[in-house]
Amino acid sequence: MLKSAFTIVKDEISGIMNKYLLNAILIAAFGLFAGIFFDVNAQTVSGSIGNGAVLRGGSAKGSIILNIPGGLHVNSSRPNSEYAIPTTVRLIGTGVQAVGISFPRGKNRRFQFSDESINVYEGRVAIPFTITVPKNFKGNTLRIRARVRYQACTEEVCYPPQSKEVTLTARVK
C-alpha cells in the first residue's frame, strides 16, 4: 500500500520529535545526576587550634568542623550498623601530640535503605581534640594535618566513602 506524502512527512516529523524528546530526557537525567554527584562532594572540612596560638610546653583545644549540606547526612563515628562506614578523624603533626578526639553524638534516624536506625551527623558538626606542644618544640608554627573519612548518604542511598584533608596551624609562643 502506498503512503501519501502527508503520511510520510508526518512519520518523519514524529521520528524527529521522538529523538529530540529522548535527548531532552537524557540531558535532564544527566543534569539531575550531576547535581546529586556534586552535592555528595559538597561537604567541607575546616578547623582551628585554640585561638591561633599555643604555649610551648602547654596544650590547647582544637576542633575539626564538618559541614554537611542539606539533603545529605554522614554516618556518625558510631553508626550502629555493620554496613554503615563510620566517620573517622586522623590527626598528624610533627613534634606535637594530638589526643582526645571526642566525636559528638549523632542522631538516630531511619532510612528507606535500612531496616534499622542509623546514627548520623547532619548540618555542622564540631569534633574537638586537644593538642600538646612539648617544651622543646622547635619552630614558631605547628601544623596538624587532619584527615576526615566519611560516608555521605541521602534518604535513599549511601555513596562510597570519601576522605578530605585540611592543615591546621597555630603560632607557638
Image (cartoon, rainbow, N blue to C red):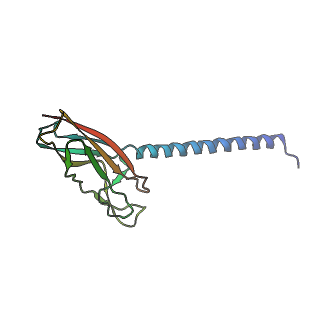
Residue ID at (54%, 44%): 30
| Quarter where residue 80 is shown | bottom left
Residue placed most toward the observer, 146 or 8: 146
Q: As rendered, which of 141 and 33 lies closer to the eye?
A: 141
The residue lying at 36 percent from left, 66 percent from top is 116
Measured along the vertical axis of the image, is residue 111 above or below residue 67? below
In this rendering, position of residue 26 left or right of residue 161: right
In the image, is residue 81 above or below residue 56? below
The C terminus lies in quadrant:
top left
Q: Residue furthest right?
A: 1
Q: How many marks?
A: 0
Which residue sits at x=72%, y=44%?
15
**Residue 101, x across and y down, in percent:** 22, 51
Residue farthest to the bottom, as pictured:
115
Q: Position of residue 53 (x, y in %)?
A: 15, 36
Where is residue 91? Give x, y as percent: 26, 47
- Between 19 and 149, the one nearer to me in the picture: 149
Tell which residue pokes out farthest to the top in this image.
140
Residue 76 on image: x %, y %? 30, 56
Q: Horizontally, is 19 left or right of 153 in the view?
A: right
Image side of residue 149 versus residue 133, left or right: right
